[in-house]
């Protein structure tokens, strides 16, 4: 063999070696592998509560403030999020049975619920409001609801409030607050007690046969719930929430869904 051909072969061999070594090294760090190693967090909500969690009709996807917030938290702390929808009054039981890892469902932090689950730091300030038909000039506050026909979503703080004001047999319970608001729109009940931002959003969507009256009642705070004693998950969720509040992501998501700076 000629000397120059020998050298050419040597160079080809060396190149092949370099390529294979570099190739292997690169393979170890592909993002696909990292993603596969991320622990999965099964998150549930009652996705009928716009603008917090609902289904986009055109795609069938779950969207809303809570969905994006939880996605951002999971990204921040390295969880792969799997989102599910189930009835609001079954969420706490599902946590207790460890069928799901977390709930983000515009769920108000209450002492009663704290007996059954653990809550993250608060992530949204809310309150209850009365909705009536636009033509109704008789009901102007919570006090006026006594003896009136009310509609509420089962298992909510709105339902509890309604029960404090009027007899249970005057209350119709629905699995979603939209159904309760439609009942009001159709004139079958006198008022709906529900979370302010959700009833306000419903009206904004073109349901102007309905209006909100009186003051927003009691300040409520929403929290992310986890099964009791799941401290590691809870600490990660709190750390993620803190991080997205600091890096501007929380404000960005808040403004997108509520059109204003966070309260
Ligand atoms: N904030 C109220 C509560 O905790 C209502 C929440 C309803 N949420 C829902 N996704 N349907 O009781």
Image (cartoon, grey):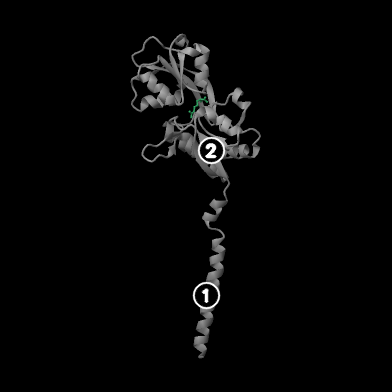
Look at the numbered disc 1 and say if its residue's Cβ is closer than 8 Å to ligand 1: no
Residue 253 x %, y %: 46, 37
Task: Compare residues 242 and 203 and report the one nearer the observer.
Answer: 203
Along the horizontal axis of the image, is 61 left or right of 43? left
Residue at (58% x, 33% y) in the render: 95
Residue 126 x %, y %: 50, 25
Task: Decide: is 30 above or below 54.
Answer: below
- Image marks 1 and 2: residues in contact by CB distance under 8 Å: no
Disc nearer the start of the sequence (1/2): 1
Residue 58 x %, y %: 36, 39
Residue at (55% x, 53% y) in the render: 34
Task: Decide: is 88 above or below 68.
Answer: above
- Can residue 110 be seen here? yes
Residue position for label 1:
15
Specify the quadrant of the image occupied by residue 240.
top right
Residue at (52% x, 89% y) in the render: 3
Task: Compare residues 253 and 203 and report the one nearer the observer.
Answer: 203
Residue at (54% x, 51% y) in the render: 35
Q: Residues within 10 Å of mark 1 (few under 14, many from 20)?
A: few
Specify the quadrant of the image occupied by residue 174.
top left
Residue 165 x %, y %: 50, 12
Asked which secondary structure carries label 1, the reply is helix
Along the horizontal axis of the image, is 191 left or right of 39? left
Asked which secondary structure carries label 2, the reply is strand
- Can residue 225 be seen here? no
Q: Which mark is residue 43?
A: 2
Task: Decide: is 253 above or below 145.
Answer: below
Q: CA distance from mark 1 to mark 2?
A: 49 Å
Question: Residue lying furthest bottom in this view?
Answer: 2
Q: Which mark is residue 217?
A: none
Look at the numbered disc 2 and say if its residue's Cβ is closer than 8 Å to ligand 1: no
Viewer-side label of 1, 2: 2
């Amino acid at each position: 063999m000629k000397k120059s051909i020998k050298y050419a072969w040597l160079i080809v061999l060396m190149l092949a070696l370099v390529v294979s070594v570099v190739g292997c090294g690169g393979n170890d760090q592909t993002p696909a592998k990292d993603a596969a190693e991320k622990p999965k967090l099964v998150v549930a909500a009652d996705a009928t509560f716009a603008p917090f969690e609902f289904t986009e009709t055109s795609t069938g996807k779950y969207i809303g403030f809570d969905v994006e917030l939880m996605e951002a938290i999971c990204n921040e702390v390295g969880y792969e999020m799997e989102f599910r929808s189930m009835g609001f009054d079954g969420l706490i039981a599902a946590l207790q049975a460890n069928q799901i890892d977390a709930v983000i469902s515009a769920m108000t932090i209450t002492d009663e619920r704290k007996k059954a689950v653990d809550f993250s730091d608060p992530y949204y300030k809310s309150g209850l409001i009365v909705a009536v038909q636009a033509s109704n000039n008789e009901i102007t506050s919570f006090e006026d609801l006594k003896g009136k026909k009310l509609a509420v979503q089962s298992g909510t703080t709105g339902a509890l409030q309604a029960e404090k004001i009027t007899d249970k047999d005057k209350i119709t319970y629905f699995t979603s607050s939209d159904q309760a608001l439609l009942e009001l729109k159709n004139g079958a009940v006198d008022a709906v007690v529900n979370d302010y931002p959700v009833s306000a959003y419903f009206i904004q969507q073109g349901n102007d046969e309905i209006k909100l009256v009186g003051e927003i009642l009691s300040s409520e705070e929403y929290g992310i719930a986890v099964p009791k004693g799941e401290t590691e998950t809870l600490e990660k969720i709190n750390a993620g929430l803190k991080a997205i509040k600091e890096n501007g992501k929380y404000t960005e998501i808040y403004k997108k869904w509520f059109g204003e700076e966070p309260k």
